[in-house]
Image: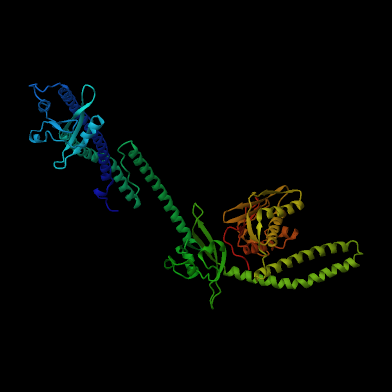
Amino acid sequence: MNKVGFFRSIQLKFIIIYILLLLVAIQVIGSFFTNELETELRDSFEDSVHDRVDLLSYNVEQAFNRERSEDDEGPTLQEEIQRIVSDVDTEDITSIQVINNQNRIIGSNDVFNQDEVGKKTTREIVQSALFLDQEQENTYVTQDTGNRVYVQAVPIFDNEGNSNGVIYLEASLEGVYDQIQNINEIFLQGSMLAIAVSAFIGILVARTITRPISEMQMQAQTMAKGDFTQKVNVYSKDEIGQLADTFNDLNSRLKHSYATIEEERRKLSSVLSNMSDGVISTDVTGAVILMNEAAGRLIGEDPEEIIGGFLLDVLPLEGKIVDITELQDSGSIIIDFSDDEQFFLVRANFSTVFDEEDEVTGFITVISDVTEQERIDQDRREFVSNVSHELRTPLTTMKSYMEALTDGAWEDKEIAPKFLRVTQNETERMIRMVNDLLQLSRMDTKSYGLEMEKTNFTNYFHEVIDRFDMNIPEHIALKREVPKAKFNVWMDKDKMTQVLDNVISNAIKYSPEGGVIRLKLENKKHFLLVSVQDEGMGIAYDKLEKIFERFYRADKARTRKLGGTGLGLAISKELVEAHYGKIWAKSKEGKGTTVLFTLPLMNEKRRDNK
């Protein structure tokens, strides 16, 4: 990772923010101070002007109200007004004119424009003061010099309150604004000095904040390389110091987690390397990300060359799986790798990997060599088909013989009843066997049809249990663990009833006196899980997977005594898988057996059986 330059660093950002905040504060204070200063100075200036105007107004009114005769040798009104105006202090007042009520200028302090005396004025402010008999004032900027000028027109009244004229004056405001300008320059110089000092302090403050962060950044880069031996220095007990403590704690935890993950990785690598079954891991798109040596030997490919390839290209699944998303519905598939020289079959079991939010993140494919097993199953299927046809004739003969005994040969009261009873029981058992064999044969050839329909499995499950509840032996109890929610399943009710009959009947057969059979229904989001648990003798671990094979009996003596054929669970397995489900068993010797199977829920992807 490249080192961050100063102009892109957080240290510069701290300094800029610090200075900007100071500038905003200075700007707000300066604006308020300048406005208040301008107002105060102008008010003071106008008050000074008003005081002098009041004195001038008094003297002018006295001059206007003084009586004069024609032979009076004293000064005329115009001469007296001119003398009064000339005596006014003109430090701030630049122009004073006295206008009579005829709009004629009778006095002016401007020695350069004495020719205006005696002329009429047309100034609007003067006209307003004469017309309204009220004091008028205004401020304007001269066009030639750009100076600000304060003007005022004050009416003059006689003793009876009638207007005799107006005093018009102009006063320059430049002195006021020059003072404001000088103060602003002093304020600006102070602000620049404050900004310089603040920038220096900001650098020092920013370094105290950014230095621990820089150290943590370098430590994070070191941790990214797998080195967890170093620690971050803690300089204070504030938030940055607490962050450094937390960072060090995180470093310790990551070191422990990394060691644990590495140990688990080695274990997993060892397990995968020594497995006889092949394992292929793919991401959600179906690209191969992991493949062990056993899988390479089974499919005849180098695992290193397969990494990155597409699973559907690695395994010949054409016609079985079209899209990678169908893997989560596929369960187990037999793949034919046979050629002209060798018969070779591989079973592929697919499972979906979900994250903590139940989103699909990939798929795990486990492949194993089932060539011999499939050959045995093929031979057994052929045997079942042959035996089914061979048994029909003797069964029919036995049934006819039983009818003959019933019609007349029952006179021997000791032998006939026993013979009839045994013959009838054996006949019925053999007929059940034949029917089971024929059903398995139809399943093997895919010649059976499923009448699929939408079914509320909760209600359906209760109906099946209710039927057993009415005829169950008194020494056995059925315990239901079924939620009240509605779970819709696409299934053949008759075929699923046969599955449940087989599973529940086996649980009843193997339950001891006082045993409890638990029938449970669970929603696993993508599928429905059905389980039937008994408290019987249990099944050994090495024999658990064989109970779904044809003719296999966990307890052969007891099964024959109870009339079992060894085909019920095999039929159940075929029917469950025909519904795109899975069936398996869990058991411990002496602690009972649990048979479980799944069915896809309607809101999940399903494929109709045509």
Query: Which quadrant of the view contains residue 408?
Result: bottom right
Please identify the quarter of the rendering in which residue 93 is found.
top left
Residue 608, horizontal then vertical, whole percent? 61, 65
Q: Residue furthest bottom?
A: 340
* Res 419 → quadrant: bottom right
Q: Is residue 555 at least partly visible in the picture?
A: no
Left or right, residue 277 beside residue 589: left
Position above or below: 176 against 384: above
The total of numbered circles placed on residues is: 0
Considering depth in this image, is 297 or 603 the residue closer to the camera? 603
Of 370 and 501, nearer the camera is 501
Q: Nearer the viewer, residue 477 or 340?
A: 477
* In the image: residue 132, left or right of residue 280: left
Q: Residue 190, percent across and down?
A: 18, 35
Q: Is residue 590 above or below residue 492?
A: above
At x 18%, y 28%, the residue is 49
Q: How is the image coloured?
A: rainbow
Quadrant of the image containing the C terminus: bottom right
Task: Please name whichever residue, 90 or 133, is drawn nearer the observer in this view of the structure.
Answer: 133
Image: 176 above or below 374 = above
In the rendered view, would you say 68 is above or below 465?
above
Residue 106 appears in view: yes
Location of residue 334 in the rendering, given as x and y in whole percent from the top left corner: 57, 68
Q: Position of residue 307 (x, y in %)?
A: 43, 65
Q: Residue furthest front?
A: 70
